[in-house]
Amino acid sequence: MILIKNGRVIDPLNKIDKKQDIIIENDRIKEIGENLDLKYNQKDLKVIDADNLVIAPGFVDVHVHFRDPGLTYKEDIHTGANSAAKGGYTTVVCMANTKPPIDNANVLKDLVEREQSLLINVLNTANVTVGMQGKELTDFKALKEANAIGLTDDGIPIKDEKLVLEAFKKAKELDLPISLHEEDPALIGSSGVNQGAISKKIGVKGAPAIAEDVLVARDCMLALEVGNKIDIQHISSKRSVEIIELAKKMGANVYAEVTPQHIALTEEAVLTKGTMAKVNPPLRTKEDKDALIMALKKGVIDMIATDHAPHSKEEKMKSISEAPSGMIGLETALAVCITNLVKSGHLSLMQLIEKMTINPARFYNLEVGHLTEGAKADIVIFDVKQSWIVDKKDFVSKASNSPFIGEKLYGRVKYTICNGKIVYSDMQEL
């Protein structure tokens, strides 16, 4: 058994925020209470003293790329899972834009089988369309039977409205959530950099917010019509926030996610961070960033997701127009959010943890993201006050494409426990 004692337990589902102890037996939370060290024989316990630390549910990320199969020089399921564990994540959902894409049950079954030995819970989406070509729907039923927990063509928007409508109807029948990358390619000059003063300054055409807004509006209205559950991924635009808020008021079953980078940085980061700040959708204006933070406060944006997108050093060393978009985020997400949301007074720790645990778990109907007696022991313990400088040598991911390298952040994961086992400690990286 493991005893975690003297920590500040924060659990949004059960509305707990107080000093308590937790006993873990096998893979479950056996008991939560006070002075549990007096109740159990300490000879039988591994004791973690969490004095001055926060004990929270293990984080849940609905949007990561582990590049497996086919692109494992960037990341693989093992390095991705280790990176997640170091960041405090105990459950992550991988996107399906791999090589080959996960558009059939055979590819998915192989991946699921290989993921069983990982330190954390790694789950999978499958593609909405065959080959991510946007022309023909995959076999949703077969993919669900092969353990796909949702559907997405993340990375490539689906242009055909009729096909999207058909996909929404089939997904609703099977209770499969669909996650959507909303950028209309017809309206984009070049990807990864916001269209405006900064794109002009560095000599690229850029990607305007309207490219996001039009597809967000379309898919919110289609979801309202059908009644299925959708996730608007990595939202970046103020107008998209307003569209989602309206759609929710109208009764659409719409969730929205935002990344740590979109609430921490603006388009100007490209001037100092170069390709490390190139991402789809792009970092936008301060007005957009402020709107995203306000939407988190109001509950319009439900989830914080990293969109962990590893690329090789060689790829990111290319020019701003040639380098791929994307950045890693699992190991810095908590600290970026504490620094930019909690320390600045925008969110309480309870609100932040809610958007990193129970809300993403609810989107996929997962029995994780909370601290309840009898529940799976998926727990993160962190120091909210500890400051540190992001150093690329410290990443356990294969990649180091982060715009936060060299930045001082607050909040450090001390332990990650998944299924009752310590899978990360800052004293010993496992």
Image: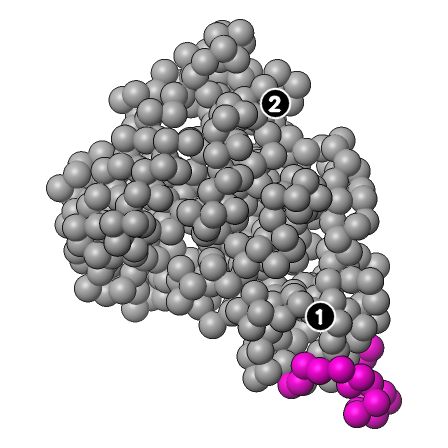
Q: Residues within 10 Å of mark 1 (few under 14, many from 20)?
A: some
Q: Residue at x 56, y 65 (%)?
A: 12
Q: Residue at x 75, y 78 (%)?
A: 21
Q: Say which of 155 and 212 sits in front.
A: 212
Q: Which residue is mark 1?
A: 18
The percent position of residue 311, horizontal first and vertical second, equals 56, 35
Query: Which dot, 2 or 1, sits closer to the camera?
Result: 1
Quarter containing the N terminus: bottom right
In the visual, does 165 lie left or right of 100? left
Q: Residue at x 16, y 50 (%)?
A: 225
Residue 377 visible, this angle: yes
Quarter containing the C terminus: bottom right
Q: Is residue 44 magenta?
A: yes
- The amino acid beneath tag 2 is Ala
The percent position of residue 424, horizontal first and vertical second, equals 72, 61
Q: Secondary structure at mark 1?
A: strand
In the displayed structure, 139 sits above or below 1; it is above
Q: Is residue 89 magenta?
A: no
The percent position of residue 185, horizontal first and vertical second, equals 30, 25
In the visual, does 334 lie left or right of 221? right
- The amino acid beneath tag 1 is Lys
Q: Earlier in the sequence, mark 2 or mark 1?
A: 1
Res 135 quadrant in image: top left
In the rendered structure, find residue 269 and report the number of the disc placed on it: 2
In the visual, does 30 lie left or right of 70? right
Res 402 quadrant in image: top right
**Span highlighted in magenta in the image:** 30-48
In the displayed structure, 331 sits above or below 368; it is above
Q: For the residues marked 2 and 1, what is the alpha-carbon distance in whole angstroms?
A: 38 Å
In the visual, does 196 lie left or right of 335? left
In the displayed structure, 372 sits above or below 57; it is below
